[in-house]
Image: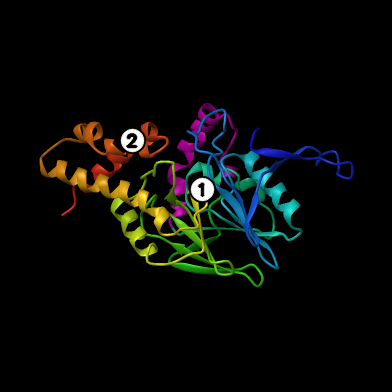
Amino acid sequence: MRWFGLLCGMALSFAAQCAPLLKVEQVAPGIYLHLSEHHWPDRENHGEIANIGFIVGDRCVAVIDSGGSPQQGIALRNAIKQATAKPVCYVINTHVHPDHIYGNRAFKEPGVQFVGHHKLARAMAARGDHYLSRAAELLDIHVNRDNIIPPDLQVKQTMTLNLGNRELLLTAHSSAHTDNDLSVYDKTTDTLWLADLLFLEHIPVVDGSIKGWLAELEKLEKNNYKLVIPGHGRLVRDWPAAMLPQKTYLSELVTEIRAMVKQGKTLEQAVEQVGLAAKKRWQLFEQFHRKNVTTAFAELEWED
């Protein structure tokens, strides 16, 4: 697999030799990130398409999303062991999508608590069977219910986790990318891990509420952060400027769909006509744009 190296050595046990090791970079003190490329999830990349990583405190480690396959979860776990001797105490799933949760099982052991939005468990229960039924065919991975682990700690508004002289502020957002989005703010380095609330280069994917997403962005852009980590795309050191392409795309969809609804146009017409000017600005446009229009149309068609 192209995304990991090999952890080998004479001093290691045979079982540990040549174990998968996820490539991570320390992007700020104690913050380690695996930056993924933009791909449609398939049998070649096994759904390993999201930015994932971990944060190290004086006492323990918090994983931020566990990866798109059980194998990537193992590789992430091995990368943590190479970076620090401190144990993992939290696995934070930022939302329900498979590229963020399928590595969970690698961290299921005593002392580890899983953390997520208060709607995450419900979303896992509702989507789990469908996700699992398609994983082998679409991603060439083998998963079962043991790979979809609901949160032990549920964030209803905000929650603070202390890793030992390092506090993480978790925020449960209103429906946006999904209805179970969670962000993680590291006070020590002024880093906001936004996950899929922020897409760069990769077209944003609407699976919750387009109006809610714009509302969350309006709140977030009022703040300044030294570093912002998106779920898909490069590291952001120019917040909120880096967010503007996403906001523009979502705003354009809302404006155009509202106009079509007012004119009595159908969903089918909207799918064929809305947002086409944005095609050259986004990777994976063909794969996700029509779905975005469909989801947004269903929401905007019935607004007051």
Q: Residue at x 32, y 40 (%)?
A: 292
Q: Quadrant of residue 26?
A: bottom right
Q: Quadrant of residue 239?
A: bottom left
10 Å crowding of disc 1: few (<14), some (14-19), many (20+): some
Q: Amino acid at mark 1?
A: Arg
Q: Is residue 103 magenta?
A: no
Q: Residue at x 40, y 41 (%)?
A: 203
Q: Amino acid at mark 2?
A: Lys
Q: Residue at x 44, y 41 (%)?
A: 202
Q: Is residue 115 above or below residue 100?
A: below
Label number found at residue 3: none
Residue 109 locus on image (x, y percent) = 69, 53
Residue 267 locus on image (x, y percent) = 21, 36
In this figure, which residue is indicated by the disc labeled 1?
234
Query: Magenta: predominant secondary structure element?
Result: helix
Which stretch did the figure color magenta? 119-148
As helix, strand or loop, the secondary structure at mark 1 comes to loop
